[in-house]
Image (cartoon, rainbow, N blue to C red):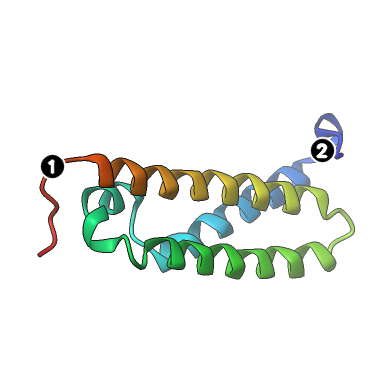
Amino acid sequence: MADVGAMTEGDAVAMLVAAGLVMECIAASCSSPQTAEINASKRQATLMKWVHIGIVESAVLIGIAAMVTKRPAPIIWGGVLAGGTMYAQYRHALKAGLKSNAPGTEN
C-alpha cells in the first residue's frame, strides 16, 4: 500500500489527473447521475452498460499511465477512488430513480 504521507507534489497532481480522467471517461459515456436518476425508467436498459464501458476505458488509460511512470501508485489510487465513486453514484441513481414516482424529463 502506498504511503500517502510520502507523496510528493507531483504524485498529488498525478493522482488528481488520474481521478479526473476516470470521471471524464464515465461522463463522456453517460450523462450526470442526477439526470440518470430523473430518467431511470427510460435509461434503465442501457445506463449501466455505458458506465461499465467508461470504467473499462478509464482502466485501460490508467493502466497505460501507471506502466510508464516510476511511481504508479498515485495514478492507480486516483483511478480506483474515482472509478469506485462514480460507479457508486450511478448505481445509486439507478436504484433511487426506479423507486421514485416523480416524472422524468424524457418521453
Q: Secondary structure at mark 2?
A: loop
Total marks drawn? Answer: 2
Q: Amino acid at mark 1?
A: Ala
> What is the number of the mark on residue 68?
none
CA gap between label 1 and label 2 equals 46 Å
Seen from the viewer's position, the closer of residues 13 and 66 is 66
Label 2 crowd (10 A; few <14 / some 14-19 / many >=20)? some
Residue that numbered label 2 is attached to: 7
Asked if the residue under mark 2 is in contact with the one under mark 1, i.e. CB atoms within 8 Å, the reply is no
Residue under the point 26% across and 41% down: 99
Does residue 5 lie above or below 28 as drawn? above
Seen from the viewer's position, the closer of residues 10 and 93 is 93
12 horizontally vs 26: left or right: right
Extreme residue toward the top, this view? 5
90 horizontally vs 56: left or right: left
Does residue 54 lie above or below 41 as drawn? below
Does residue 32 lie above or below 56 as drawn? above
Residue 33, horizontal then vertical, whole percent = 35, 49
Residue under the point 30% across and 53% down: 36
Residue 26, horizontal then vertical, whole percent = 48, 61
Q: Secondary structure at mark 1?
A: loop
Residue that numbered label 1 is attached to: 102
Residue under the point 81% across and 40% down: 8
The quadrant of the picture occupied by the C terminus is bottom left
The quadrant of the picture occupied by the N terminus is top right
Residue 31, horizontal then vertical, whole percent = 33, 60
Of the two numbered discs 1 and 2 in the rendering, the one whose residue sits closer to the viewer: 1
Q: Amino acid at mark 2?
A: Met
